[in-house]
Amino acid sequence: MSGYLIVSYQNVYGLSIQPRNEGEHDMSTEIIGGKTEPNRHSITGETKTNLPAPLHPARSAHIIRDDREAIAVASRLASRFAQEASARDRDRRLPLKELDEFSQSGLWGITVPKEYGGAGVSNVTLAEVTAIIAEADSSLGQIPQNHFYMVEAVRLDGSEAQKKFYFERVLAGDRFGNAFCELGTRTVFDFQARLRADDGKLVLGGKKFYSTGALFAHWISVVAKDDEGKIVVVFVKQGTDGATVIDDWSSFGQRTTASGTVILDNVNVAPFAVLPHQASFERPTPMGPIAQIIHAAVDVGIARAALADTIDFVRRYTRPWIDSGQEHGYEDPYTIAQIGDLQIRVHAADALLERAGRYVDAAVASPSDRSVAEASVAVAEVKALATETSILVTNKLFELAGTRSTLAEYNLDRHWRNARTHTLHDPVRWKYHAIGNFWLNGVNPPRHGAS
């Protein structure tokens, strides 16, 4: 009998480990020596319980004051995060320590509006910060995506009291995780989770998957439908009775995002914790473009990292083909030409990412049907190019670097695995359709979180 472990935050200060029945999950984990790793053997009758450092509510995060500081802090963190990124991926070592450093740096609070004490950075800066971190470690780049999404949701539709409270928590260093999507539904927006009124109380129930960041969060942001069929977001404090986070993410890519399951079993909810999220799409808002530009930035970061590793490997190890007549692999004329082609594509993705950020900023400043549509299309353009570029660069890495680059000791396949996994967010074929329909037929993209 194989042992399956649920990582369940029974309170904010500690973890409990609960066995699951055999066969319910393909991925098993155990907590060993202060880190979470894949379970490499079956467990019979017992589980290991050497727990990592507990997740404490953050209280003293640094406050970043402007865009320039945000870029500087991101660059400084990225240099450290990159050092063990390959090892974290190879061992599936969840980045608990790194996430604490990340959120305490103040970067998770950079989009809090200035009137509430934050830096209110531009979306150009938000995208570049994400790309910088994702270049160092694409899992760390992705984990805050839904956190920033929820900060924007509060900005758009939170009450004044909610804004003051949740923005204060974000600036203190608290992290939002997501519990949005569900397995087995007709579409990604066919939410079965329900927030229902029951004898004068609000009760939340459902099961979520792809819950990126929930395992590491102080607050789990749950998307559900209320009794009127309206989409709402419910903030569930980590450790709330009935809320269980399971580390069963078994994808071959983005391995340390812990994007597994959240189970909500009759969770009592205060009205203060509920946002009317559907309202963000019933009027023109930049909600969708902000969600998507962060995804695009992760893909840009992966492409940057893969190209840098390709150049480094070719310079250090790759031999020239016998017919080239050259002494070094980096002198091969066909390799030189293809590196040039890849660099152009990465620079083009960089440029489109910055351009898209400017369009999103315009939609934030003056939201209208036209400005939001333009922002959505601009973001779709960079998402399409970043998808194709990240997959191309991570594939070309091996062709140009040679067979030696496939050895496990280098773990360079992580770039392709991460690109292939992350670019599956929101099919790129529909980005091309939205772009073409806008420019050819004047049809605005639909308004939702994937557009």
Image (cartoon, grey):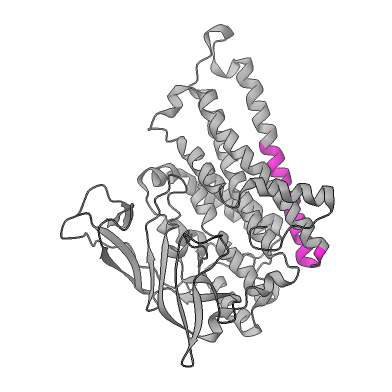
Horizontal relation, residue 384 to residue 370: left or right:
left
The residue sitting at the left extreme is: 45
Q: Is residue 251 visible?
A: yes
Work out whether 217 lies above or below 357. below
Please tell me in which quadrant of the rendered image residue 343 appears. Answer: top right
Work out whether 31 lies above or below 408. below
Is residue 356 rendered magenta in the image?
Answer: yes
Query: Looking at the figure, which quarter contains the N terminus?
Result: bottom left
Q: Give coordinates of residue 127: x percent, y percent.
A: 65, 54
Horizontal relation, residue 63 to residue 366: left or right:
left
Horizontal relation, residue 220 to residue 358: left or right:
left
Horizontal relation, residue 53 to residue 69: left or right:
left
Q: Residue at x 46, y 78 (%)?
A: 204
Q: Which residues are magenta?
A: 346-369
Query: Looking at the figure, which quarter contains the C terminus?
Result: bottom right
Q: Give coordinates of residue 383: x percent, y percent.
A: 66, 48
Q: Is residue 381 visible?
A: no
Q: Give coordinates of residue 18: x percent, y percent.
A: 27, 66
Depth check: give the residue in front, 34 or 335. 335
Work out whether 327 lies above or below 112. above
Q: Give coordinates of residue 166: x percent, y percent.
A: 57, 77
Q: Residue at x 22, y 59 (%)?
A: 48
Please tell me in which quadrant of the rendered image residue 4 appears. Answer: bottom left
The residue sitting at the front extreme is: 186
Is residue 374 rendered magenta in the image?
Answer: no
